[in-house]
Amino acid sequence: MEYAQIQRKKRGRLKLGKRLVGILLGSLLFSVGLEIFLIPNHIIDGGITGISIMLSHLTGFGLGFFLFFLNLPFLFIGYKQIGKTFALSTLFGIVIMSIGTTLLKPVPGLTTDPLLAAVFGGIILGIGVGMVIRNGGSLDGTEILAILFDKKSPFSVGETVLFLNIFILGSAGFIFGWNHAMYSLIAYYIAFKMIDITIEGLNQSRSIWIISDKPKQIGDAILARLGRGVTYLNGEGAYTGDDKKVIFCVITRLEEAKLRSIIDDVDETAFLAVGSINDVKGANFKKKNIH
């Protein structure tokens, strides 16, 4: 029992260490994207970061100062709404981000081409934010605010974040000029996409639901040709009242085309539904490559 407890504590410390390293690296990447690419070219990001960049430009105060203090109220909200672990992880990330932008301030930008800055800055920014979110934290209070508004308004979290960011990015046009505001939109879009890729991975998993009159043949073919296990579920057609076998399995994104081909070979009339899965654990599931 004592040995098992020691092992659990070791695994817990190792897991915490990995999370902290992930948040540390993500926050540093975020700082690099801002100070080395976006800010020297007067390009901003959305959310509290964008507001901080504009306030820093207008007042002359350091960006790190605004990044830290403007996010503090949202940390309190995050603590109340989401939990202590999230709040502490977010605080750690924001502190590293604020220190990183302060230390990188004297470093000259790598390019004076605003398009290159928007593209590469957006990529680095998105990877950094994605790493922090994947490890249980956040670098911007806008998402927390949107979650709070979601309970009191007819708009979804995504719609609220989009509205706030359009307003913030649009405001950049009055401060830096409309060309830079449009470059900011490019950077924001690229960062948004890179966040998804970083969180979900390029090898994102798919959940597959198949309804066919030949469930056993399809299941055997998937097992033999794709090497994936399947689960048979009992279903009933609402219109016909007939008993149906529903096939469920999980595959990687790279395996989806081959799975469709297998189903077509067995039953071209089969019903197929495909959904995205952010994470898969257990049942010896491995993300293998297709050869």
Image (cartoon, rainbow, N blue to C red):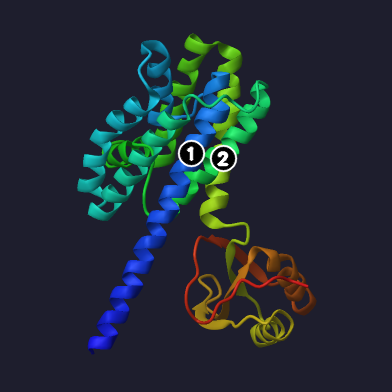
Expressed as whole percent of the image width and height from the top left, the position of residue 17 reads 37, 61
Q: Which residue is mark 1?
A: 30
**Quadrant of the rendering where the N terminus is positioned:** bottom left
The amino acid type of the residue labelled 2 equals: Ile
Q: Which residue is mark 2?
A: 124
Residue 139, quarter of picture: top left
The local crowd at label 1, few if under 14, some if 14 to 19, many if 20 or more residues have their Cα within 10 Å, is many
Q: Is residue 1 left or right of residue 131?
A: left
**Quadrant of the rendering where the C terminus is positioned:** bottom right
Residue 210 or residue 6, whichever sits in front: 6
Q: Is residue 148 left or right of residue 217?
A: left
- Quick one: label 2 or label 1, which is nearer the N terminus? 1
Residue at horizontal 39 percent and vertical 18 percent from the top: 56
Residue 222 or residue 142, whichever sits in front: 142
Residue at horizontal 65 percent and vertical 20 percent from the top: 112
The local crowd at label 2, few if under 14, some if 14 to 19, many if 20 or more residues have their Cα within 10 Å, is many
Expressed as whole percent of the image width and height from the top left, the position of residue 93 reads 36, 44
